[in-house]
Each structure stands twice: as structure tokens, then as C-alpha cells.
Image (tube, helix red, strand yellow):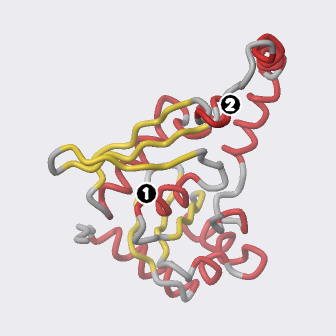
Amino acid sequence: MRIKLNTEDIMRISLFEKMTGADVIDSVADEEKITFVIKEGDIGAAIGKGGENVRNATEKFGRKIDLIEYSDDVKQFIRNIFAPVELEDVWTKKFGDDLVVYLRIHPKLRRAIIGDKGKKIDSAVDLVSRLSGVKNIKVIAGLRKDKKVAKKEEAPAKAEEAKTDVKEVKAEAEKVEKAPEATETQKTE
């Protein structure tokens, strides 16, 4: 894994490592937030007792701080990127030299994964491609075959339930997007 960092990235990583004692593998930043990819096993140190390190870093950098625990296993790393959202399934497919990751998610969580105007999924693709051979992430909104409605007579009830779920879906998506990125829910399944 070879990452190109500019001077600003190196300074930001160095400062965060000094503040937390955690090893940082990579960092990307935009106007709103800074994302640090933390060495596997160091996420607790990065968060700090009661989230203290995250709060201090937020004050110091003046932006929201997002922490992601790195994993050599691409599937696990993808799960960590999207935590606390639960992914139904993650698998990879190779097309020539390109590796593509597929995510199966519950339809209710599509907005939480894709983000506003595709911002979150684009950011995830950029991050994972920097650290692995992954070239793209494809999102499939739908339940696995083993979770689909088994009987035809159950389908109308499920359809009606889905219609009444709209408010819950929006509330859940907003809750997931507003959730602090660096919490104990970052720990993977």
C-alpha cells in the first residue's frame, strides 16, 4: 500500500498522533470534516476516554473528526468505513485488474450509505482506493434472497408496512448521519 501525502496531510497526521498516541495510516480532509484511518487495534486510543481525544481534535482542527479503523481485510475495512450502519452483505469481484466491492444494504439505509448527492459513497471510494486495490463500490438496496418474503400472502402486508415506514426511514437515516462517527459503535461485528 503506497499513499501519497502532501505536507498538510503529514502535519495533520503528526499532530493527531501526538494528541492521541494512536497510529494513523491515512487522512483525508474537506471543508466540513477530517477523516483519520487508524491502525487496527488503536481505535480506542484515538477516541480517548469518553471521546475526549475526538472532542479535543475537533476543537483543535475546527472541523468534525471521523475515525475509521483500518483492516487488511477489504470487506471488514468497508464495514468499518460505514459503521455504525449495518451492511447486509459485502463481497468483491475482480474485473481484469480492477477490484469492485458490492454492498447489499437494507433499502431504508440507502441515503445513510450514499449520502447527500452521493458525497458519502464517493468519499468511501476515494478512501478505500487509496489503501487497497478497490476501484469502485456498488450499492445494492434490497434484502438477501434468504430474507425475502417467503409466502405470496405475506407480500401485501409487507408492502403496506413499507408504506407506513417512510417517516421511520427518514428518522433512521438522519440519526445515522448525525451519529458521532467515533463511538463504541465503530467496533465491528
Which callout, 1 or 2, points to the residue nearer the camera? 2
Which residue is farthest front? 151
Amino acid on which disc 1 is placed: Ala
- Would you name the residue on which mark 1 appears? 29
The image quadrant where one finds the C terminus is bottom right
Query: Looking at this view, is 40 or 154 the one in front?
Result: 154
Marks 1/2: CA–CA distance: 28 Å
Could you tell me residue 115's position as x and y percent? 55, 36
Q: Eyeballing the image, is 49 above or below 96?
A: below
Which label sits on residue 108? 2
Secondary structure beneath label 1: strand
Please give left or right for residue 10 compared with residue 37 in the image: left
Compared across the picture, whether 85 is left or right of 104 comes to right
Residue at 56% in and 66% down: 67
Label 2 Cα crowd, 10 Å radius (few <14 / some 14-19 / many 20+): some
In the figure, is residue 187 to the left or right of 152? left
Q: Which of 97 and 40 is in front in this view?
A: 97
Residue 147: x and y in percent read 67, 35
Q: Mark 1 or mark 2: name the one nearer the start of the chain.
A: 1
* Depth order, front residue of 20/56: 20
> Which corner quadrant of the image does residue 162 belong to?
top right
